[in-house]
Image: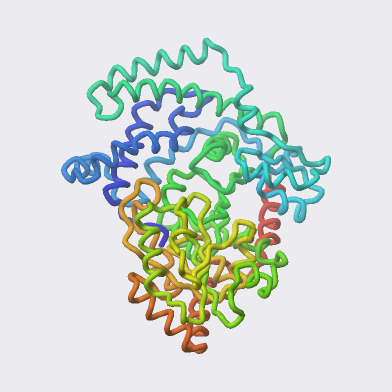
Amino acid sequence: MYGEEKLNNHYILRYTLTKEFFETFHSLKYHGIELTLPIVRQFHIYIKRFVNANRSNQQYVKRLQKKHKLYTMKDAQRALARIPRRVKNLSNQTQRKTILLPGRFVSFALKQFPSANIVFLVSTKEDEKALQSVVIPSNMKVFNYHASLNKKAIPKSVTQSIVRKANRLLNKQKRHRVFGKKTFRNWFRKLIKKSIKIIATLEELLLNNPIKIIVDHVEIINPGTTLSLLARRFNLPFVNMPQVLIGDRSLIPTRATYYFVWGKLYKEWLIKRGIHPSRIKETGNINFEYQKNNQTMAKQRVCQLMRIPSNHLIITYTTQPFSKSVNQQITNWFTRAVHSSLPLTIVIRPHPYDKLDYSRLFQGKPNIVVAPKTLKLYDLLYNSDIVATISSNTGVEGALLGKALFILQPKIPYHYEHHNNNFNAHLANAKAGPAIYNQRQLASYLSKVIASPTYRDVLRRQSQRFITQTLNPTSTPSVHIRQLMTILVRKR
């Protein structure tokens, strides 16, 4: 659903090399945690050039696969999890009742846990932004991850001892196609020092505060990666609670105790990756819940803002940070399929990382407009008739708001991060809306929705069938999550 079960060449290389990385340097530890584990994401970034250069080398890829016996995502998860040995059971300490949450969840915490002890972990600009707009009560406090990491001092004797050991291991790998390179040696020495600091900083956070449960929205990057390792070491529940669509590259390896997932499709996807069903809770998505319930701008005002005629259907296309060639394909489809005589307007909502100048590309096309940056996403989605996307969260959000969907499926070239499996077909595979593969099909579907209100209703019903599979339809996410967290806080 969100990526194939069978490993393709990209993932064979990514995960066999990761396995070799973990196994080769497993003896390098700090406070019982292997130093390679916290820097897995940095390693995946480091090997990008090597993977891209060798993924078509079928003989080499198959040799690695046979050697490591990694054929499925479940195999990769099993091989890479490397759960650290438990040394303490902090869950039994009765004074531990504090919840560690990313700062971005502050609205949820203030509404659902107003009197609970909360530590907000700030590690991103989104966390900072969320906390800037609220007053934190005395029972809650903020921990700045990067500031604490920068201040953390590790005894020189500790790092020198580990680097000496690392050098001995590196000297045995001179013939390795990755580990034998001088660039890797320099990179590795630098990163293991950082890994030590990350472990020390977050271990101190857990030991100096009565934290009972840890919640994060992503586990492949720090602080989530290391917190999940420390949670296992100290027997503290770690909850992986994604708020945006994720695929395998954002998940594996995972060591969470529990997974609070959107709904049925994500639960099935995790089970296929070896996660036991008892550890997966279908909770929905609190971000979607809060955004949906916010007051939105009136349609008349939205139309005035973008000079859209009141009798026009509004089709919003949300772009994604694909290569220029991909976004240019979609641009060409709309340019050729949308004529000024049609009673519809295409609104382009560029992704923040999409650098195409759409205003210039659509000059002389009165039926195609670019959404102003001041217009909030949900104001636009709420007032659209159809949401068009390739694989964005906005497909889910549009369906949640009762909108019909167009699933655009252009030809997407391989990309190390953004297109390395079939993730970008997840909306098409889920039959969330008609899958559109070219300009001719787009023109045909535009004609249908213009001519037939009945067909628009058919598409809306299709999106609603999709949303009941994607999001748990039986609960209010924030309430359900509060109930589950409360159980974990009280459990000894």
Find the residue positioned furthest to the left: 59
Give the residue at x 63% y 61%. 375
Q: Position of residue 107 (x, y in %)?
A: 72, 52
Q: Position of residue 458 (x, y in %)?
A: 49, 84
Find the residue positioned furthest to the front: 364
Give the residue at x 40% y 51%. 418
Give the residue at x 81% y 41%. 139
- Quadrant including the C terminus: top right
Location of residue 338 with respect to 79 vertically, above or below: below
Q: Position of residue 386 (x, y in %)?
A: 52, 74
Give the residue at x 41% y 62%. 1
| Quadrant in the picture for residue 292 | bottom right
The residue lying toward the viewer, choosing from 391 and 81, is 391
Is the image coloured rainbow, by chain, by secondary structure, or in one colour?
Answer: rainbow
> Horizontally, is 227 left or right of 436 in the view?
right
The residue lying toward the viewer, choosing from 70 and 416, is 416
| Quadrant in the picture for residue 291 | bottom right
Location of residue 93 with respect to 303 vertically, above or below: above
| Quadrant in the picture for residue 428 | bottom left
Label count reads 0
Find the residue positioned furthest to the top: 157
Location of residue 368 with respect to 239 vertically, above or below: below
Q: Position of residue 273 (x, y in %)?
A: 41, 53
